[in-house]
Amino acid sequence: MLRQVLHAGLRTSFHALGRFVASHPVFFASAPVLLSILLGASFSRYRVEEDVESLLAPKHSLAKIEGNLVDSLFPVNRSKHALYSDLQTPGRYGRVIVTTRKGSVLDPVHLDTILKLHRRIYQMQVTVPATGFNSFNYSFSYLCLPDDKNVCIIDDIIRAMEEIQSARTSNRSVPILRYPITQLADGRQAYIGHQLGGVQGWGPKGVRSARALQLTYYLQARGGLMDRVASQWEKAFCAELQHFAALHPKLGLYPSTSSSLRTDFQFSSVLARRPLLASLGVCGVLAVLCCSMRDCVRSKPWLGLLALLSITLSGLTAAGILNLTGATYNSTYLGIPFVMLGHGLFGSFEMLSSWRRTREDQHVKERVASVFEDVMLRFSGSTMLHLMTLGLAASPLTNMEAVRLFCRTVALAITISYVYMLSFYSSCLVFTGYLETGYRHGCFCRRVPKPDRLDSKPAWYRCLMYTRYQDETQITNPPHGVGHNPHPQDSHLLLGCVRRCYGDWITNTYVKPFVVLLYLVYISFGLMGFLQVTQGSDPSALVAMDTMTVLYTRAQQRYFSSYSPVIGFYIYESAPYWNASVQRDLLEYAKGFQRISWLEAYLNYLSDRNQSTSQPRENFTRTLRHSFLREPQFAHFADDIIFSERGQGEEPDVAASRIFLVAKTTENKREEMSVLLDTLRRLSLTSRVRFLIFNPSFVYLDRYAAAVSSPLRHSLLAVLFLLGLSSLAVVEPLVSVWLGLTLLSVQFGVLGFMTLWGVELDCMSVLCLISALGHSADCSGPLLCGFASGRGESRTRWVRVALERHGVPSLQTLICYSAALVPVGSVRSNLTRTLFRCLTLTAGCSALHTLAFLPTLLTFLPPSKSRGHRPGGEGQRQEVECVEMNDSTRVVDQITTV
């Protein structure tokens, strides 16, 4: 009873709203246009997001807290001897991987060329500002991070190569270059595993061949001016490398800077501009064709373009609101137009389909009110599903900033699109309705002459002006409870195909087993892909192709994948380093790693001097400060130890320290780093020494799978909860069950097939999966509601009716939607490639369920059609016999005999 009361109340409300909109079409058509123009003027405040890490890394993670602690204990500017390029990343830097087409980078010719490149970069100058009397020239020596002697910190491999070049010039024996830890001329040991790559044949006699070399140039950014200078230096750095590569074709140069990831991530938006316009054009052409029919009066091609215009205006309004609120844009927003397109087109095609089922003798206001009463309840329900999924994913529960911002923006755009569909598009439907009532051409708005006058016209004119006046029609009695178009011969092409061919074919007894078998195959392949889902935590997988970031990442994976990035092992509390058991524990933790450890070097130093490694605290600390750290080969360890003062006359304590670890890795470098992170963290919880480990890549790896999958899981649970709640009062319980199962099936298929297609579970694919919930609800929800609302007749008959009424709008939407995706697939970007594949799979899986799986399964699964009639339900009217009385032009009235 409650469901019937709510249904009646909502349908009456929408009927009144439809009459109100139809009574004021000019206002509802002009107000959205004016509002969009006013808000569109705010694009002068357009800003692009510059912090990519905040977008693509989990917002709240232990790795970020650990990174802040590490920066407070060991800031980059405090390091006065050596820096590790993949551990300490200052605000600005320039980095290049040098490879050889043939031979080794250590060959004399290549080595001299690389040192020449190093000198050119060292001497390179930038002028800021570019013009004017206040311009100054800045070189690398002014911008670099200085050491304790106020000399620029450079990579250790450069010092080793300079030593090799000097030995060859003076005809001395070439010093042995070991790998991955070598010893420099001053006796200091240096890790060069992240600087020398593609190494072949190393042993006691040193490295014989290396295919790649990585150099890093660190810059300071002290305030706004120095940051602008450093930014200009990075641009000049890339230009210099490009020029140098043209002069030396035997070398391959792959540069990267601190701004490369941000630039290449946002470059996808630039590449997608023209394809997006092409998508809009292709979708417009198909929308016009989908709204057209042979009858020139009942054909409404302009409504296809007006539907796209309504979606465009809503997008412009949403963008204006974002600009006024100070929001920033990023490349993940490329998926927003397609979410709006799928939802808006389906609503417009549903309204047009309902319009064609109304009585033509009614006034336009009544016809529009009937459309609102028939369509808006379902369209509002699907909009609520969209807002529920997107709203929960945009909540603070989401730990991924890119997902949260995307869902918040899409929720705003969907809301505005819904309002514009009720106002702008509905008023356009009113105007075209008046054209139809006046027998005017649907495209040219010219009045169509009557048949007696049309017979004297040329054949092309008769074809162009073809229509059927009411006095030519012969209405037959439709089956009870089923409303047919009184002009089946004038139906739309797709409607005619579904009515005459597809509906009978898909419900055929001999076809059903093959459809069920197809669904089992669908589930099998979906399960196969679901079991192989991998997380895509690498941010380079979301940038444009053939950019600096992608080329640099490929070169790094090819030549520098033998060892992991340098991992910092930080002991952040005072520990009894002089205790033998603590020393054994720390040495055991570092066992199996390549390591640069002050503690291990100090213990060896004591052993070489025949001193005990287990000494009282005072002696241990005094020898460390006054003997060990003053030796030239050990002086660089001063950067790794923080002393805290005790009382007057007492030796200070070691308050904090760090050592550097490097693990041997294979091809699955990121997966192994994730496992290593979890293992060492578990160890830190049980250790007597309080330590943490950190590398900048941990910010992306730490709980990435949970951060990416949680918004999808929350959205899915929210949809199921909403369906369960609505089944108590609004929707029939079986409809909610069927819709929930359909959404789960579509999500399962999209997730499995996208994995088989080579798409990883990253933030972009999760965004597509969240939007797939709403898209599949748009397509399958009205079909299920239409089937469940019918009473009497057979299951097969009502499946055919549901396909005619709601399957055709779904098919029209899927045709336009899929065609709009095709131009995006040609964009050379990893982000748009993921977007194209996920949205294509969403459209395909939704089409399979709406047009194949559901029509077949509903013919032999609940809800049943054999139950007794309940008064008040849709389709439960008394049996009627309709007799028409016609005048010369229009239907006057209907006399109903009960």
Image (cartoon, helix red, strand yellow):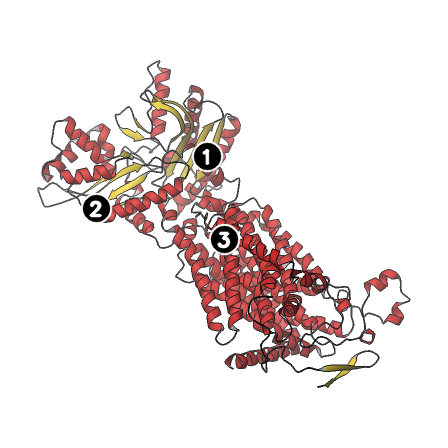
Residue 505 placed where, x, y %? 68, 60
Of callouts 1 and 2, the N-terminal one: 1
- In this rendering, is residue 88 above or below 156? below
Q: Residues within 10 Å of mark 3 (few under 14, many from 20)?
A: many
Determine whether label 3 and label 1 are within 8 Å by CB: no
Instruction: Please indicate whether residue 407 sits to the left or right of residue 866 in the image.
Output: left
Contact? badges 1 and 2 (CB < 8 Å): no
Which amino acid lies under the numbered mark 2 shown in the image of this protein? Ser
Nearer to us of marks 3 and 1 is: 3
Which residue is at 53% across, 62% downward?
742
Residue 676 drawn at (x, y percent): 33, 43
Q: What residue is rendered at 47% in x and 54% in y?
A: 766
The mark found on residue 555 in the picture is 1
Separation of residues labelled 1 and 2 (CA atoms):
38 Å
**Can residue 577 be seen in this snapshot?**
no
Mark 3 highlights which residue? 751
Structural crowding at the residue carrying mark 2, measured as other residues with C-alpha within 10 Å and reported as few (<14), some (14–19) or many (≥20): few
Relative side of 481 to 255, left or right = right
In the displayed structure image, the side of residue 57 where residue 509 appears, left or right? right
Near mark 1 (Cα within 10 A), the count class, few <14, some 14-19 or many ≥20, is some
Among the two numbered marks 3 and 1 on one chain, the one whose residue lies closer to the N terminus: 1
Residue wearing tag 2: 687
Relative to 487, say whether 339 is above or below. above
The amino acid type of the residue labelled 1 equals Ala
233 relative to 30, above or below: above
Task: Tell me which corner region of the image, top left, top right, bottom left or bottom right, holds residue 782.
Answer: bottom right
Front-lying residue, 364 or 673: 673
Question: Label 3 sits on what residue type?
Answer: Leu
Residue 50, image x, y percentages? 45, 50
